[in-house]
Image: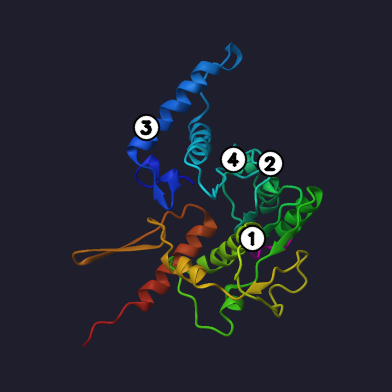
């Protein structure tokens, strides 16, 4: 994942924790020296920063024999250096926004085309509610690549018949991220042959999802582990509240129009939820 907040080691994590300094140092030089030994005159320079770290991350995961690797693209998808995995278990596209326009294009449709480049033949993919035209572009890209694409139901559909889910990440926008994460996790668990994943639930189409060109994925009864996972998720520097003496800091790394709008909505709600001082 990128970018990191404090240390570059945050980009490569195992079991949720950044790899140790010793491990980072070990694999950095293994990869660096191997690339140095195999370069040719036509490609004498090292891969760029993000590309080098991507190669290193793949090497770390292979050498450490992880059960599952979650890989986030750097920019876009189609031409991103992470997009070399030929047969991932599942792919996900979160809420689209305008960013990196010099590379990806200056419209949501162009950006959606780039994002759809991660779709692979026969590999299920999921996305969240998107504007009409960008969603249509994602559908077309999925069709071109013979990839089954599904729209995630709202998180409320998972909560039906049980108590409200508690998310470790604040902000209403994190609910769509959580719904996407649930579909990705269930798909991987199914592929692993795990039992007791919870029965599927019929989801009535909301007004927002009616007429969408992408079929709706089913909601399902969540396992205790899924509920705990949503509750325990943390992302430092994202919708984070820190208190230091008399000052309360509201921290977020928002840097696009849509993410700044989401940050503002979170901040307003967080302030409203504060306990008012007793008079």
Q: Mark on residue 86? A: 2
Rendered image quadrant of residue 73:
top right
Give the Cα distance between marks 3 and 4.
22 Å
Residue at point 50%, 41% (across, down): 61
Dot 1 or dot 2, earlier in sequence? 2
CB within 8 Å, label 3 to label 2: no
Residue 209, magenta (yes or no): no
Q: Mark on residue 37? A: none
Give the Cα distance between marks 2 and 4.
11 Å
Residue 178 position in % (x across, y down):
54, 66
Residue 72 versus residue 56 in the image, above or below? below
Residue 47 position in % (x across, y down):
53, 27
Neighbours of disc 3 within 10 Å: few (<14), some (14-19), many (20+): few
Q: Given the current orientation, which residue lies at the most extreme left position?
A: 245
Note whether residue 118 is visible.
yes
161 or 67, which lies in front? 67
Dot 4 or dot 1, earlier in sequence? 4
199 or 182, which lies in front? 199
30 or 245, which lies in front? 30
Mark 2 vs mark 4: in front: 2
Q: Mark on residue 82? A: 4
Give the Cα distance between marks 1 and 3.
36 Å
Residue at point 49%, 64% (across, down): 262
Residue 83 versus residue 239 in the image, above or below? above
Residue at point 43%, 47% (across, down): 13
Q: Which residues are magenta?
A: 127-132
Q: Which residue is mark 1?
A: 193
């Amino acid at each position: 994942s990128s970018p990191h907040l404090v240390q570059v080691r945050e980009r490569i994590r195992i079991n949720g924790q950044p790899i140790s300094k010793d491990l980072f140092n070990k694999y950095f030089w293994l990869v660096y020296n191997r690339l140095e030994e195999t370069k040719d005159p036509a490609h004498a320079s090292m891969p760029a920063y993000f590309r080098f770290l991507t190669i290193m991350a793949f090497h770390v995961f292979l050498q450490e024999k992880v059960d599952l690797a979650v890989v986030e693209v750097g920019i876009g998808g189609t031409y991103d250096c992470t997009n070399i995995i030929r047969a991932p278990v599942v792919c996900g596209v979160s809420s689209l926004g305008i960013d990196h326009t010099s590379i990806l294009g200056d419209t949501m449709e162009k950006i959606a085309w780039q994002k759809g480049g991660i779709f692979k033949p026969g590999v299920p993919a999921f996305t969240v509610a998107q504007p009409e035209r960008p969603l249509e572009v994602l559908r077309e890209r999925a069709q071109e690549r013979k990839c089954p694409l599904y729209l995630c139901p709202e998180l409320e559909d998972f909560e039906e018949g049980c108590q409200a889910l508690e998310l470790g990440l604040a902000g209403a926008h994190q609910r769509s991220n959580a719904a996407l994460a649930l579909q990705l996790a269930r798909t991987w668990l199914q592929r692993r042959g795990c039992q007791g994943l919870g029965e599927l639930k019929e989801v009535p189409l909301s007004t927002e999802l009616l007429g969408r060109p992408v079929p709706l994925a089913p909601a399902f009864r969540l396992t205790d582990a899924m509920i705990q996972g949503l509750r325990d998720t943390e992302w430092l520097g994202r919708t984070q509240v820190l208190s230091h003496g008399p000052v309360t800091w509201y921290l977020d790394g928002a840097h696009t129009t849509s993410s700044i709008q989401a940050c503002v909505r979170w901040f307003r709600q967080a302030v409203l939820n504060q306990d008012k001082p007793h008079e």
